[in-house]
Amino acid sequence: HGDSEHHPDMSYRSLYTDIIHWMDSQGIKKASIIGHSLGGKTGMVAATELPDRIKSVICIDALPFDYRWSKAARHSDLVKLVEL
């Protein structure tokens, strides 16, 4: 978004590694992450991969699945999630 420079690797691993490097630079051992959209998914992946570093995750407007699905498949899967 915008005119910001972008790193060529925008994988979740690259993104959560940036978070961990920043936490290390600030002396933060464990943190809660609040993320919107891509930030929410990055937080979910970070918590899954590094549970000893992530205390909790608050996701805003992000779901734990691939958004590239068709609209019909997405709707039926959302219904299943809600029923859980």
Image (cartoon, rainbow, N blue to C red):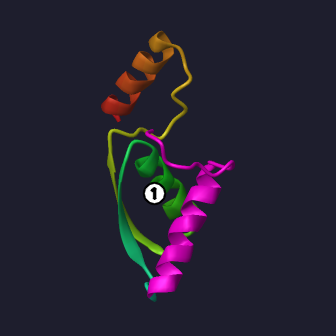
Quarter of the C terminus within the rendering: top left
Element on which disc 1 rests: helix
In the image, residue 81 above or below residue 5: above
In the image, residue 81 above or below residue 79: below
Question: Residue sitting at 68 percent across and 50 percent down?
Answer: 9
Q: Name the spot of residue 47 as percent of width and height, x first.
A: 49, 63
Q: Residues within 10 Å of mark 1 (few under 14, many from 20)?
A: many
**Residue located beneath label 1 in the image:** 43
Question: Residue sitting at 51 percent across and 28 percent down?
Answer: 67
The segment highlighted magenta reads 1-26
Question: Residue sitting at 43 percent across and 79 percent down?
Answer: 30
Q: Name the spot of residue 52 as percent of width and height, x first.
A: 51, 77
Question: Residue sitting at 56 percent across and 49 percent down?
Answer: 5
Q: Amino acid at mark 1?
A: Gly
In the image, residue 64 above or below residue 73: below
- Quarter of the image where one finds residue 17: bottom right
Q: In the shown orientation, is residue 57 left or right of residue 12?
A: left
